[in-house]
Amino acid sequence: MSTPVSPGVLAALSPRDSEEGGTQAQLAEIDASCRGSVLLFFLSGMVWLLIGTVLALVASYKLHAPDFLGNAEWLTFGRVRTAHLNAAIYGFSAEIAVGVILWLMCRLCRVPLMAQAVINSAAVFWNVGLAIGIGGILAGDTTGVEYLELPKYSTPILFLAFALIAVWTIVIFRFRREKHLYVSQWYILAAVLWFPWLYSTAQLLLVMDPARGAVQAAVNWWFAHNVLGLWFTPVGLASIYYFLPKVIGRPIHSYYLSVLGFWTLALFYNWNGFHHLVGGPFPAWMITISIVASVMMIIPVVATAINHHFTMIGHFGKLKYSPTLRFIVFGAMSYTVSSLQGVLSAVRWFSETAHFTHHTVAHAHWGMYAFFAMTMFGSMYYILPRITQREWPSERLISLHFWCTAIGVILYVVPLSWGGWLQGKAMLDAQIPFLDVVKVTLPYLKFRTVTGVILAVGHVAFFANICWLLVRTFGPYRQPEPMILAGVRSEAAPVGK
Amino acid sequence: MGIITFILIGSSLAFPAVALYALWWAGRHGQLSHQDKASLLPFDEEEPLGQMTDMVLNHPRNAASASAAKS
């Protein structure tokens, strides 16, 4: 027999009861309510970004200098690369995403974040679980399943933390004051429901009670592809659909196209994972359906691209003023390019050459970094001054961050994609010894390490600017008044070019 | 394995059902219509339509305060 939720619990959570007459919450109240929790997720996400960057540099350097740190077993390539991936995915990307989700939901629902202790405890659980898991990976406890390498003694903690986050996002939605939904809310609600389903199913079938044989590969790619497309992609698109109109002061070009993009993503994306299994021991229809669904992804991608582009037309001059807009536009353009490249990569003839090469690594960074990470950086540039009520301390550090990450990721992705293609061609030629194939990739791998250093400079610049901002907010020499309210909100900023 | 199979098949059926319900709910509650209103939801009285809200770089105010600090 189910126990109904006590009206007392709901009443205690409802923000309506904390205000007289149920008047619309002011933006400042919403921002202030989000401050502690969002800062907690942002700061811990940034720490994981720096840890992930160091691990990435070590792993990248090892690919062309394998003796580097070769005497320490916990720093062998297999462990360092895996630790980098998990720090970047579950540390940086997921935690920043949760911070952005909370702030966006509160803003769009027009309610303050209630009972922050719940969300804060989720952040603590998430970080503890991840630290245990990455420590386990470095100690050699990886499961060996891509994107699910965290050992099984850490993943229940992560699941518990995310369940709290998902429930709390729905609680915010439940108490919304604005009844009409914006498209960003569709994406966010879908993302917080999709991820626990994907993660728990994959954990059950691959880690807790593993399926046997080829089924493992099918489940693995179902999860690995969907965690990008049904968790990170919706959060990235939710951010773009909010911040792009918000910054330039113009509504999205076609709301109809944005809704079409959401529902077609929901319909087609979850079939895509099996295109990674082209040539594998699976029924042909299974692979073919996945390739067809991958090609159908052209519909949401092109709808989104058209919408973003036509929204920005006439407003590109504003890129000069807004760091948020720079990162968000870069992320939106990267979404289009990386998604269309993903469609191409799903086709059999292309996959046969490119799949087991560095081309796939480049594609993953195009999606997860050039699209998602850049979009999250842009979102943080908008959110942090508002929740701290302080302006960014250094324009130079913002510019350094943008140019290092934008140029760095382009120089990372384009040459490595080409190097991966040459690697694939060489591997398909039975006359070429494997060692010669490895030598083909060497210049591209060395160049990748250089671009990794450029990206690292950008990350350090961003982290330094955030620390400076926090010193201004909480430190002994904090500014006497919030400049952002005096300088931006009340001033008539230029419209159009 | 029996319980896990039950959970997996159940969730696989429940998830599309939730999606279909969401689509039905959206249609019934006017979420798929009134699109002009929906597109204005990011804006409000404090950050209204027609106003840029993220003037951080190269702002004339920043240049003025920098030159004032130098002098």
Image (cartoon, helix red, strand yellow):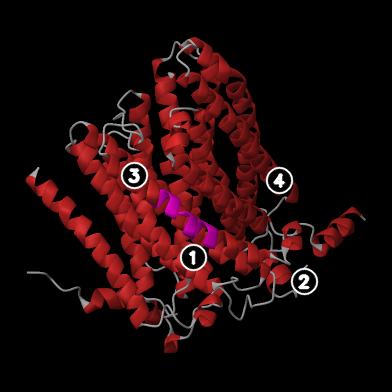
**Separation of marks 3 and 4 at Cα, in angstroms:** 48 Å
Residue A6 drawn in magenta: no
Circle nearer the N terminus (4, 2): 4
Task: Check the image and report above or below for A39 versus A491.
Answer: above
- Identify residue for label 4: A397
Q: Position of residue A326 (x, y in %)?
A: 67, 54
Chain that bears disc 2: A
Label 3 CA crowd tier, 10 Å (few <14, some 14–19, many 20+): some
Residue A167 is drawn in which quadrant? Answer: bottom left
Where is residue A193 shown, x and y percent of the image? 32, 59
Residue segment shown in magenta? A293-303
Mark 2 nearby-residue class (10 Å; few <14, some 14–19, many ≥20):
some
**Which corner quadrant of the image does residue A313 belong to?**
bottom right
* Label 3 sits on residue: A288
Badge 3 amino acid: Thr
Residue A307 relative to residue B1: left or right: right
Sequence-wise, the earlier of marks 3 and 2 is 3
* Kind of residue sitting beneath label 4: Leu
CA separation in Å, label 3 and label 1: 38 Å
Q: Is residue A380 above or below residue A276?
A: below
The first of marks 3 and 4 along the sequence is 3
Residue at the far right in the pictured view: B71
Q: Badges 3 and 4: C-beta atoms under 8 Å apart? A: no
Residue behind mark 1:
A104
